[in-house]
Image (spheres, helix red, strand yellow):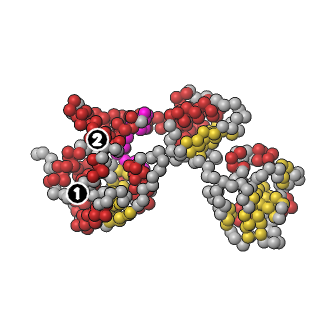
């Protein structure tokens, strides 16, 4: 007996989500055909007792004049299915070097991340042709295995998982489901605009390929799956190397250990390291620059390679990676009343805590106020227990504080006297041993 039109769709959803049978589902619903099929089929599964709890989310990007009507349409559809709905209106920023489509996606997923419940499943309606388009776009960008793997069926996301149950379904199956169930969906006119790369691939390139190679979609989907497996193997290899090489205390890479690997292992290791630090992956050119200017630089060199999402620096035989450092004014001076437990410093990611100073043994001054400054050069301090006054520059070297962090290390002054280096030392004139020492 042949399957009903509903069954391939329902089966795809159940199969994709079966690894977590009790986790709540969050359906991303745009109002278009694909997401309407996902929403409708999921609601059926819920009625049949084949799905756990379901909620729905709709994000209005405000990029089309009709978007307000779409909000109302989506609300009515979800209400008819008797499901809970959260709707959000967002502003899409115009970032240099990023397409409008990519910017909208980033904003949309930021909302999804905040709404997805703990251990929940975010379900989106990407299908086989979406996967094919992604492979083409990644190929034209010169991507490697991770890029050509395109979109995975499932991946960790926020506090739970992102599931794409329709990745192996052709859009024809979704169209047949929609017609059979008499769904009423929205046609976004921007989907026909050839100015967007994805739309150009969809409307200009893929129809030509279809005429010559009718089975291209399955073949390219298989390419994505195989590239995903290759990328996973590369990740496993790099993860094992990182466990052996990376300094767990500061997440740095010892340069000598990296140079003991062959060139391909070095490149794979650095990619995995940057990814583990949640940094945007640099271009191939930047990765090559990291190799030449960092690994092969002279021992006393302190180069820096930057890109849009991060930077890599070299110091004391190690590689450091971080997000781009914010603008910081090292000339600023801030008064800190001792009755205030914390002090926020412009340009520093973390606020200063009075508890840290007290744990260092810092003695409160009679004035009840201290002053926070930053290194200008020539500072000296007599660290408690050392008995010798030393230049702050020498102490920073002794403490292995990287140069880019020295200018951001808070210096605690009482009057015009350097009384403490926040997090490192207290001058013996202002030191009292904490209880228990």
Assign the N terminus to one quadrant of the image: top left
Asked whether residue 236 is in view, the answer is no
- Side of 1 where 420 appears, left or right: right
Magenta part of the chain? 142-157
For label 1, the residue is: 185
Residue found at x 43% / y 33%: 142
- Image quadrant where one finds the C terminus: bottom right
Instruction: Say if the magenta span includes residue 147.
Output: yes
Q: CA distance from mark 2 to mark 1?
A: 20 Å
Q: Residue at x 64, y 29 (%)?
A: 296
- Asked whether residue 377 is in view, the answer is yes
Q: Are marks 2 and 1 in contact (CB under 8 Å)?
A: no
Report which residue position mark 2 lands on. Answer: 202
Q: Residue at x 68, y 47 (%)?
A: 404
Q: Residue furthest left?
A: 1
Query: Is the residue marked by circle 1 packed among few (<14), some (14-19), or many (20+) residues within 10 Å?
Result: some
Q: Characterize the local packing of mark 2: few (<14), some (14-19) or many (20 or more) Cα atoms within 10 angstroms.
A: some
């Amino acid at each position: 007996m042949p399957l009903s039109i509903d069954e391939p769709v329902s089966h795809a959803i159940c199969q994709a989500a079966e690894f977590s049978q009790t986790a709540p589902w969050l359906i991303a619903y745009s109002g278009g055909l694909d997401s309407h099929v996902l929403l409708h089929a999921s609601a059926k599964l819920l009625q049949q007792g084949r799905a756990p709890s379901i909620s729905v989310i709709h994000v209005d990007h405000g990029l089309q004049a009709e978007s307000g009507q779409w909000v109302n349409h989506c609300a009515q559809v979800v209400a008819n299915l008797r499901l809970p709905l959260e709707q959000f209106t967002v502003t899409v920023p115009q970032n240099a070097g990023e397409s409008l489509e990519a910017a909208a996606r980033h904003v949309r997923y930021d909302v999804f991340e905040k709404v997805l419940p703990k251990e929940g499943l975010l379900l989106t309606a990407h299908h086989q042709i979406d996967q094919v388009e992604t492979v083409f776009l990644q190929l034209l960008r010169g991507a490697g295995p991770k890029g050509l793997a395109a979109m995975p069926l499932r991946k960790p996301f926020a506090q739970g998982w992102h599931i794409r149950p329709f990745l192996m379904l052709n859009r024809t199956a979704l169209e047949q489901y929609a017609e059979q169930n008499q769904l009423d969906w929205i046609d976004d006119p921007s989907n026909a605009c050839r100015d967007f790369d994805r739309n150009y691939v969809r409307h200009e390139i893929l129809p030509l390929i279809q005429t010559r190679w009718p089975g291209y979609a399955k073949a390219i989907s298989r390419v994505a799956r195989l590239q995903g497996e290759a990328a996973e193997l590369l990740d496993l290899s790099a993860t094992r190397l990182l466990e052996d090489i990376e300094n767990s205390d500061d997440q740095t890479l010892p340069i000598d250990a990296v140079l003991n690997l062959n060139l391909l292992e070095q490149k794979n290791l650095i990619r995995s390291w940057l990814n583990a630090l949640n940094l945007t992956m640099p271009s191939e050119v930047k990765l090559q620059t990291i190799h030449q200017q960092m690994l092969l630089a002279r021992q006393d060199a302190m180069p820096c390679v930057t890109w849009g999402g991060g930077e890599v620096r070299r110091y004391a035989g190690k590689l450091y990676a971080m997000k781009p450092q914010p603008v910081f004014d090292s000339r600023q001076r801030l008064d800190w009343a001792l009755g205030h437990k914390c002090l926020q410093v412009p340009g520093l990611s973390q606020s200063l805590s009075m508890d840290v100073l007290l744990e260092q043994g810092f003695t409160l001054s009679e004035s009840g106020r201290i002053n926070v400054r930053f290194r200008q050069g020539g500072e000296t301090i007599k660290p408690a227990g050392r008995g010798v006054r030393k230049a702050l520059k020498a102490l920073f070297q002794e403490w292995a504080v990287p140069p880019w962090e020295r200018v951001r290390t808070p210096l605690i002054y009482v009057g015009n006297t350097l009384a403490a280096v926040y997090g490192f030392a207290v001058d013996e004139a202002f030191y009292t041993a904490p209880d228990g020492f």
